[in-house]
Amino acid sequence: MERERLGRQRLTGGSWRFPAIAWVAAASACACATVGPSAPAPAQCLRLVALDPAGGSVVEERGLKHQFHVQRPGRGGVTTVTQEQCEGRGDCALFGQRPAAEFWLLDAKVPVEKRLPLPGLGEQTLSLGLGADRFGGQVWRLSLVRPGKAPQVAWVYPAELGAEGSRWFRAKDALWVELSGRTEGLACVALEADLALLSSQALDADAVTLLGEGELAQAEPVLRRAVEVAPFNATARYNLACTLSRAGRADEAMGELAEALALEPLRLAMFARVDPDLDPLRDRDDFKRLVDPAGAAARP
């Protein structure tokens, strides 16, 4: 059983879980300094300039550079282009000039708590505030907070930004939070949380607790809901495979394990080779080919 929740690390190493993309961004009132022979370095000034109903986004970066970071709807990668390239491709106008008025928007001082519906979990509380990291430093943290359960972290960001307010934009499962402040060299920061992944990670954490208590029958439907909410959550699929293996449903377990390793082959194959939950599968030829294809090919 894999007890780490799947993450998308972007800003730093370690065990923090980050969204698919996280860009420093400016609020609409941000003003960038002018570069001159004796002028200080311009404040980092980027802003969310476009957001479409499916969650695609364009972030404009100003400061030492002027460029655009374009992400298509869904889980596509990020393309960085200059202003000239952006205009030539039409990407920067693809989703409109600013996040559309019909998108849900909250302006609030920080720290703040906001209740909103999450996929597979219903209405839940998201908390944005300062907290300590594992080294004792201060960080901004966006967390899912549920009574009687450990907080599920969506992202963390160093507290170098003296944030005073926040603007929250939501389109489908993409939640953007812009923090605005007065810190020299950094006007504000915007971070995206994938709400489907956050919900799936929370459900996976619930299932891991149940598995630790030996409640296989209760854990299975929770893990299936986690996979349904975020089919790309390899850890939830892996834990479902472990649950099915322990329940004696080897063929089903192999199917889920194959799906999990297709998403995260190196990391999860390493766990699968030594995981006691998968012992009932270990003598199967398809298991050997899946977790150690080179070794399986070398066997007579």
Image: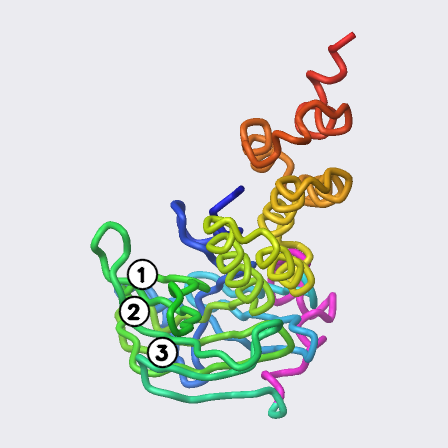
- 94 over 108 or under it: above or below: above
Q: Could you tell me if residue 8 is visible in this image? A: no
Instruction: Tell me the residue at 46%/75% (across/down).
Output: 177
Q: CA distance from mark 2 to mark 3?
A: 8 Å
Give the percent coordinates (x, y) of residue 91.
Answer: 70, 69
Please provide the residue range marked out in magenta: 76-100
- Disc 3 marks a residue whose amino acid type is Ser
Relative to 94, is 183 on the left or the right? left
Please check the rendered image and state whether residue 85 is part of the magenta-colored stretch, yes or no.
yes
Contact check, label 2 and label 1, Cβ < 8 Å: yes
- 235 over 75 or under it: above or below: above
Query: Which residue is at the front of the view, 81 or 234?
Result: 234
Q: Which residue is mark 1?
A: 158
- Density class for disc 3 (Cα within 10 Å; few <14, some 14-19, many ≥20) is many
Query: Which residue is at the front of the view, 77 or 144?
Result: 144
Q: Which residue is mark 3?
A: 180
Please check the rendered image and state whether residue 69 is part of the magenta-colored stretch, yes or no.
no
Task: Indicate which disc, 3 or 1, sits on the residue closer to the N terminus.
Answer: 1
Instruction: Tell me the residue at 74%/66% (across/down).
Output: 89
- Density class for disc 1 (Cα within 10 Å; few <14, some 14-19, many ≥20) is some
Per the image, label 2 sits on a secondary structure element best described as loop
- Disc 2 marks a residue whose amino acid type is Leu
Relative to 70, is 34 on the left or the right? left
Please identify, in this view, whether the residue under mark 2 or under mark 1 is nearer the observer.
Answer: 1
Task: Indicate which disc, 2 or 3, sits on the residue closer to the N terminus.
Answer: 2
As drawn, the label of residue 161 is 2
